[in-house]
Structures are given as structure tokens and as C-alpha cells.
Amino acid sequence: MIESLSYEFMQNALIAGLLASIICGIIGALVVVNRVVLLAGGIAHASYGGVGLAFFLGLPMLPVTAAFAMCAALLMALVTMHAKERADTFIGVMWAGGMALGIILLDITPGYNVDLMSYLFGGILATPNSDLVLMSILAVVVLVVVLVCYKGFWAMSFDEEFARARGVPVTFLYFVMLALIALSVVMVIRVVGLILVIALLTIPPQIAESRTSSLHTMMFLSIIFSTIFCVSGLLLSYELDISSGATIIAVSVAGFAVSLLVNKLKGRTS
């Protein structure tokens, strides 16, 4: 298992996993605390329409998909803010519609045969250096934005009405958060796939939330848990010669189950 670390593709995969853990650990904490998991999932799936649009028009995938995801996030945000009772239905429609649009556009793109599995579970073992550079830039952007807006995010996450009363620009910060979610999804999905993005955005932060009530500590723990899941999943998939993305997800789910069991046992003994 250790000898696998001598291969460049495995080194790149581990770096990609670490960068994805940093990005998703920070953004995922905001997603879980603000209870917008469904919204994040909707943005992730809807962004697939941008992938299909980029290939169909013959344009660069990253900017087109990012723009599409941002538009989808904006629409979902407007609906969740002004028609909360219909929000889950609209998100579901955007979720399914984006996926359907992407698949149809890829099907009718001349000379292009789509491999849906590569988008669902990614190709982390084939991560090029160019993607590592882009992920590094995104990680820095996420860190800077969260550091600058941390007090506002903290106030918005734990008491939105009180934050508004204190003059915190809650609406602006909400859109900033969704923009970060959209950009993170678009960038990370290129490497780890649609399913793994959702797993990293939700499972590690959920485990971390049960361990602390501090937002910054939750972000830190989310990064740690996510890194553990990614590294152990990668090494296990190499050893067993199975899909790396699916293995990372399986390890994450197992970690979540262990966390629930530990919490239940603690509840019985307290």
C-alpha cells in the first residue's frame, strides 16, 4: 500500500483529495449549519446542465459550467427567500432539469460519447497538474472570503433575525455563500465527481457538528475528517483495485455510521 505513494498519479490524487477536503470542509460547514444541504445538492446536480452546454457549444467547460451553476444558485436563492413553502419543490425541479438538460445536450453533441460514471464518481486518479493549480487557487479564494466575512457568516448561521437587527448584510452574505458553493462544486466535481462532492459537503461537517458548537472549529474538524476519508479511501481502493470515488464515499458513510453509534453510546452513558 505504501509503495503506491511513489506513483505520480497517486500523489496527484492525494493532493486533489486534500484540496477538495479544504474546500468542501469550509463550505460544507456553512452548508450544514445553515441547513441548505438540499440547496447545495440542487446546485451540484443542476450544474451538469452547464457541462452539457459547454460541450454542445464547443466552449471551455469551466467558465460555462461555473456561469450555469451561478445562475442556478441565484434562481434557487431567490425562490428560497421569497417562497420558502415551495423551495424544496423548485429545487427538485432544477435538480432534475439540470441533469436532464446536460445528458440530452451531451447525447446530441456530434462525435462525443459521454461517460456518465466519470461525472458521477469523478476521476481523482487521473487528476492533471492544471486541475491541482485551479483547485489551489479556489482553496485560497475560499479561505480569504470566509476569513473576511467570518463574523457575518457566524451571525447569519446561528441567529439570522438577530444578525439582521444588528445590521449584518444577511442577504448579501447568503448570496456570497451560494456563490462559493457553486464555484466549489464546479471545480471539485471535475476531479472527484458529482456524488463525492455532495458527500464531502455533508458527511464530514455533519460529524464535526456533533463534536463542537464553534463554527471555526467545525470547519477545522470537517477538513480533518474529510482528509481522513479521502486518504483512507484512496489507499483502500488502490489495494482492492476498485473505484476510488465510490470507495471514498463508502468510507465516509462508514465514518458517519460510527459517529452516530458513538453519539448514541455517549447518550446512554450520560
Image (cartoon, rainbow, N blue to C red):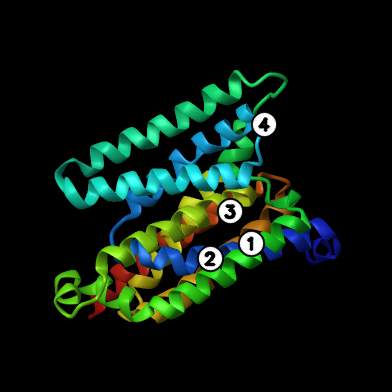
On screen, residue 34 versus residue 237, left or right, reads left
For image coordinates 56% across by 32% down, the residue present is 53
- The residue indicated by pointer 2 is 23
Q: Earlier in the sequence, mark 2 or mark 1?
A: 2
Look at the numbered discs 3 and 1 and tell me whether their residues touch, using CB distance below 8 Å.
yes
- Residue type at tag 4: Gly
The circle on residue 135 is: 1
According to the picture, the residue beneath numbered tag 3 turns out to be 187
- Distance from the alpha carbon under mark 2 to that under mark 1: 8 Å
Q: Residues within 10 Å of mark 1 (few under 14, many from 20)?
A: many
Q: Are marks 2 and 3 in contact (CB under 8 Å)?
A: yes
Name the residue: 23% across, 49% down.
Answer: 80
Give the side of residue 122 with respect to residue 99, left or right.
Answer: right
Give residue 213's mark.
none
Who comes first in sequence, dot 2 or dot 3? 2
Residue 235 at least partly seen: no
Q: Nearer the viewer, residue 195 or 23?
A: 23
Q: Position of residue 125 (x, y in %)?
A: 73, 51
Q: Nearer the viewer, mark 2 or mark 4?
A: 4
Q: Is residue 101 left or right of residue 77?
A: right
The reply to whether dot 2 and dot 1 touch (C-beta < 8 Å) is yes
Quadrant of the rendered image containing residue 153: bottom left
Distance in Å between CA atoms under marks 2 and 4: 29 Å
Tag 3, which secondary structure? helix
Which mark is in front, 2 or 3? 3
Q: Which residue is mark 4?
A: 58
Place of residue 208 in the rendered image (x, y in percent of width and height, measured from the top left): 40, 72
User: Looking at the picture, which amino acid does disc 3 mark?
Assistant: Met
